[in-house]
Amino acid sequence: DQQVKQNSPSLSVQEGRISILNCDYTNSMFDYFLWYKKYPAEGPTFLISISSIKDKNEDGRFTVFLNKSAKHLSLHIVPSQPGDSAVYFCAARGGSNYKLTFGKGTLLTVNP
Amino acid sequence: DVKVTQSSRYLVKRTGEKVFLECVQDMDHENMFWYRQDPGLGLRLIYFSYDVKMKEKGDIPEGYSVSREKKERFSLILESASTNQTSMYLCASSLPLGPTEAFFGQGTRLTVV
């Protein structure tokens, strides 16, 4: 049973435009959500997070939105740059469970 | 600068060999994790440890074991390597609870032939 779902395996965007990556979850115990970025042959690096008590968190070009009623979160990248091309993973944790549950990832390609 | 270090970037092992993957973190984190990443499957949790000598199975523990004798070191053991264990292995560490991220190592690309 997949508790964190990223339904789009890939996304292609033009440089300078907005990239929107989506993530859905099923476990209502999740209370902290994270986005990681991963380049080939490297480990994931933390990008941005949001607690369930918020609906938005912003860090430079990256904004994460959380809709708890819909169990949906999204990552917005504005403006997109070619260096943003990578696999993006959505992750969640919650309650007394300290492990992170990951989605399958979305490959973002930003074209110059 | 926080650091999680995995002992090898690339490994090639033969079927049936016992394989050790080592991970060391310098952040004094209580939690440590082993994930594997496969195309189309994302990151799947193999085992995690929340304290020295403590461990719990993740989602795909079959064919693996772990060892945590010291807080900073977490080892993944493939008891008898098989070709379906060819994968990217990722170690991570984190603080115990609360809104905190996990930090990952650079990954070990293991090929079993």
Image (tube, coloured by chain):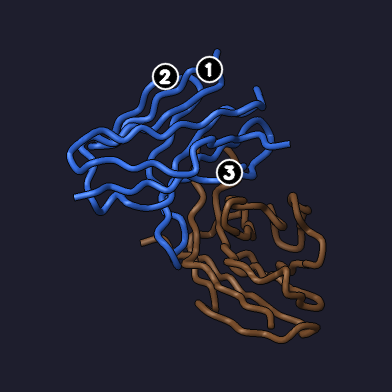
Chain colours: A blue, B brown
Q: Name the residue carrying label 2.
A: A55
Mark-to-mark CA distance, 1 and 3: 18 Å
Q: Amino acid at mark 1?
A: Lys
Label 2: few (<14), some or many (≥20) within 10 Å?
A: few
Among the 4 quarters of the image, the one containing residue A57: top left
Marked residue nearer the N-terminal end (2 or 3): 2
> Observer-nearest residue: A111 or A53?
A111
* Image marks 2 and 3: residues in contact by CB distance under 8 Å: no
Q: Which mark is nearer the camera, 2 or 3? A: 3
Instruction: Name the image quarter holding the N terminus of chain B.
Output: bottom left
Label 1 vs 3, first from the N-terminus: 1
Residue that carries the numbered disc 3 in the rendered image? A102
Whether labels 2 and 1 belong to a single chain: the reply is yes
Q: Position of residue B110 (x, y in %)?
A: 61, 75
Amino acid at circle 3: Phe
**Residue assigned mark 1:** A68
Residue displayed at 55% across by 13% down = A69
* Chain at tag 3: A
x and y percentages locating residue B88 in the rendered image:
57, 66
**Amino acid carrying mark 2 in the image:** Asp
Instruction: Give the chain of mark 1.
Output: A
Tell me the crowding category of disc 1: few under 14, some 14 to 19, or many 20 or more residues within 10 angstroms, Cα based: some
First in sequence, mark 2 or 1: give its number: 2
Q: Are marks 2 and 1 in contact (CB under 8 Å)?
A: yes
